[in-house]
Amino acid sequence: MEDKALITNATQLLSELNKNFQSCKQGTANDIRLQELQNTTLQELKKAEKLNNSILIDLEKFYQSTSLMIGLGSLKLNNQARTAWRNYDKFHYEQVKHVLTIYRPVFEFYSLEFPVFC
């Protein structure tokens, strides 16, 4: 998938989720947090001229936070919003996850008794 196409698809799916989410908001803390995440992520996508790791990290942050709120939090979605979320979920796993590269130092210390990974 081309870089611009990934950004366009992500913007379209997040806009659809945002539109469907408006009809089921209840004013809870998770509702407010999801709205902030959507707004921030959509702003970053609209500013993006080309795909880079920063955009992919923003999408991953949105995905992880939203997954947590839906799965373990009190965020309640109606059928349309849940369908929009599942569409984004599928897109994220198929298009974003395998392109994302996380750069961090990795230190491995081995012990015969207790393997420790930092």
Image (cartoon, rainbow, N blue to C red):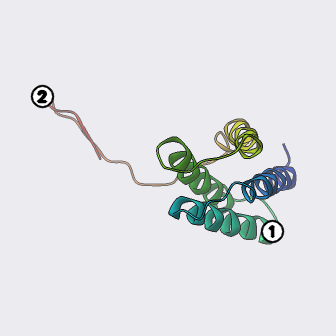
Q: Which residue, given by chain and number where applicable, does mark 2 sit on?
A: 113
Name the outermost residue toward the top. Answer: 112
Residue at position x 78%, y 52% from top?
20
Q: Position of residue 106 (x, y in %)?
A: 37, 48
Residue kind at label 2, given as amino acid type: Glu
Task: Pick whichever of labels 1 and 2 is earlier in the sequence.
Answer: 1
Depth check, front residue: 104 or 8: 8
Residue at position x 82%, y 67% from top?
49
Q: Position of residue 7 (x, y in %)?
A: 80, 56
Tell how many labels. 2
Observer-side mark, 1 or 2, equals 1
Task: Estimate the spatial distance between the alpha carbons at disc 1 and disc 2, rounded to whole Å.
Answer: 51 Å
Q: Are marks 1 and 2 in contact (CB under 8 Å)?
A: no
Tag 2 secondary structure:
loop
Q: Position of residue 11 (x, y in %)?
A: 81, 57
Name the outermost residue toward the left. Answer: 113
Above or below 37: residue 87: above
Q: Which residue, given by chain and number where applicable, does mark 1 sit on?
A: 46
Q: Is 28 situated left or right of 54 in this image?
A: left
Q: Is 76 situated left or right of 45 in this image?
A: left
Q: Is 28 situated left or right of 23 in this image?
A: left
Residue at position x 64%, y 41% from top?
97
Residue kind at label 1, given as amino acid type: Lys
The image quarter containing residue 91 is top right
Residue at position x 61%, y 56% from top?
62
Above or below 69: residue 109: above
